[in-house]
Amino acid sequence: MRFHDKVVLVTGGGSGIGRAVALGFAREGAQVVVSGRGREALEQTVKLADADTDGGRIAALTADVTDSASVAALVGEIVGRYGRLDVAVNNAGVLATGKVADQPEEDFARVLDVNLTGVFLSMKHEIPAMVAGGGGVIVNFSSQIGAHKRLPGFGAYAASKAAVTALTRTAALEYIGQGVRINAFSPGSHDTSMSMRPGETEADRAERVKGQVPAGRVGSLDEATGTVLWLASADAGYVVGADIVADGGSTA
């Protein structure tokens, strides 16, 4: 129960690693708020938490991380309800593929708007709330694709995530003196829909990954959750401005 009575925000908490992380915090005693644009997906996370814990550990609030007023309202609602914000996991992100000369400009702009500007706006409003409450922890989702690895067709995504790493490290230096500890988490392929190619089955993916990832498999949601919760915990209290890569050795 490392997070007993802590107040935690997880953006993009309606699916994938974001949902798994939210459930992980709830199991360890946190009061969690999941946010995203789709109410139905968020409510499903709430239902899973109610079945998995003693109930009431996760609340859902819709918000758009690309809109500053929306994020400000989200953080304000959390502080109004619970009195503070202790941990924020900025996980919301999108993927659009295409070679640089072929990619529609609106797709490129959308990837940067959600993945990079969304993290910037989230921190912009989370940090003052944490400073006012005596400190806090932020974990920003980057990726193995970006500062650590590049792939043809992933230019926009790589650019956005490399920038998240740089932004995270800069913010970490700026605010650690005020009690806000900030790091990045860069996952490789994990057991989510984003790691599946069109028309691919889980068995197909497993066979493909054997030849691509030194560990020979995708990461589990429990493994990703464990890393994020460690970064957010007091056990990682001396970890500041790091970018923790969990990719089965792909960028070793």
Image (cartoon, rainbow, N blue to C red):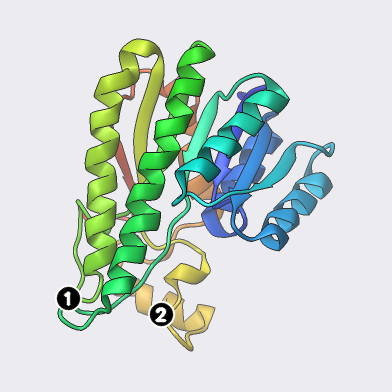
> Which quadrant is home to the N terminus?
top right
Write down the residue under mark 2: 207
- The structure residue drawn at horizontal position 41% and vertical position 65%, both measured from the top left corner, is 217
Residue at point 26%, 74% (across, down): 105
Work out whether 21 lies above or below 192: above
In the image, 217 versus 137, the foreground residue is 137
**Amino acid type of the residue that numbered disc 1 sits on in the rendered structure:** Val
In the image, taking residue 132 as reference, residue 60 lies left or right, namely right
Image check: 191 left or right of 164?
right
Residue 231 lies in quadrant: top left
Q: What amino acid is at disc 2?
A: Glu
| 202 shown above or below 13 | below
The quadrant where residue 183 appears: top left
Q: Position of residue 226 (x, y in %)?
A: 51, 40
Gap in angstroms between the C-alphas marked 2 and 1: 29 Å
Q: Residue at x 43, y 70 (%)?
A: 195
Q: Nearer the viewer, residue 220 or 215?
A: 220
Q: Are marks 2 and 1 in contact (CB under 8 Å)?
A: no
Element type at mark 2: helix
Q: Which marked residue is nearer to the observer: mark 2 or mark 1? A: 1
Q: Is residue 239 left or right of residue 9?
A: left
Residue 46 % position (x, y): 75, 49
**Of the numbered discs in the image, which one, if any, rests on residue 201?**
none
Task: Return the x and y of residue 190 as percentages of the image width and height.
Answer: 45, 61
Which comes before the other along the chain, label 2 or label 1? Answer: 1
- The extreme bottom residue here reads 199
Q: Badge 1 is on which residue?
A: 100
Of all residues, the one furthest to the front in this rendering is 69
For disc 2, the neighbor class at 10 Å (few under 14, some 14 to 19, many from 20) is few
Residue at the spot 25% in from the left edge and 70% down from the top edge: 154
